[in-house]
Amino acid sequence: MIDSHCHLAGEEFQPDLPDVVARARTAGVTGALVIIAADDEEEYERAAVVSRTWPSARFSIGVHPHAAGRFADDPSRAAQLVGDRVRGCADARAVGEIGLDYHYDFAPRDVQQTVFRAQVRLARHLRLPIVIHTREAEDDTFRVLQEEADGLVGCVLHCFTGDRAMARRALDAGHYLSLAGIVTFPRATELHEVAKMIPLDRLLIETDSPFLAPVPHRGTRNEPAHVVHVAAAIARLRDTSVDAVGEAARANFDRLFNP
Ligand SMILES: [Zn+2]
Ligand SMILES: [Zn+2]
């Protein structure tokens, strides 16, 4: 199976990246989508190290809504930077994570929206799918996506934690939903219902490493090997096999990020 969202080029993995990748392989995780913050020069440079360590890794590059404020004076500069980074990274296959985060509000909302929209337009221009981070910003996220939908090749709502109504809305718009370790939490009952309703051809699985470690690893640094716990939780909920979930998610991953 594949981990569709992790931050392996983050400094948290610098000390032991080869061990982390070895554990992923041992667990049956054959690849990953590694998220790179376009505005983080060091992380971008470490993408090459990740590539050498794990050649099947693919990359998604974007300006996160938390960092949108840095581009307040000229939002088009965010898209320009992402475009340059994507062209400089042979295995870049997506623009992201991009979106809106009204929970933390680290950047003014209007700036977040402009920077988000500029990057969606870039992705359309580059014919690349997008990876969306949205938190407490459902309506504005869907509005931008709908207004910019023309020519968009694919859209993933990463670490989806919305309810069934939001899932329905995303599925009706043609988006993919990526579930993370939260689905392993016993009390995430609404998300369990979402996990049952996503068609297998729209489902992705992820760790969001180093964040959000699933049961039974809660409270530790998360890593791609743990995506098997996400797959297992979904398989239990859907009364199917872990392999069926992993294989469906892998096929979706290849359609989006390895066309
Ligand atoms: Zn995110
Ligand atoms: Zn992330």
Image (tube, helix red, strand yellow):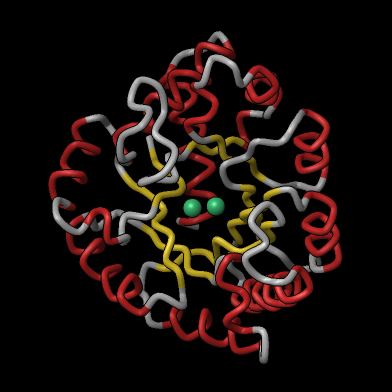
Q: Is residue 224 above or below residue 88?
A: above
Furthest residue in direction top, as rendered: 239
Q: Is residue 242 left or right of residue 197?
A: left
| x, y percent for residue 102 | 71, 56
Q: Nearer the viewer, residue 92 or 143?
A: 143
| x, y percent for residue 175 | 71, 47
Q: Is residue 14 above or below residue 207?
A: below
Residue found 61% across the figure and 84% down from its top: 71
Q: Nearer the viewer, residue 39 or 158?
A: 39
Residue found 33% across the figure and 70% down from its top: 43
Q: Is residue 52 left or right of residue 125?
A: left
Which quadrant: the N terminus? Answer: top left
Q: Is residue 101 left or right of residue 94?
A: right
Residue found 44% across the figure and 29% down from its top: 246
Q: Is residue 12 above or below residue 179?
A: below
| x, y percent for residue 164 | 78, 28
Residue found 51% across the figure and 11% down from its top: 236
Q: Is residue 132 above or below residue 234?
A: below
| x, y percent for residue 162 | 71, 36
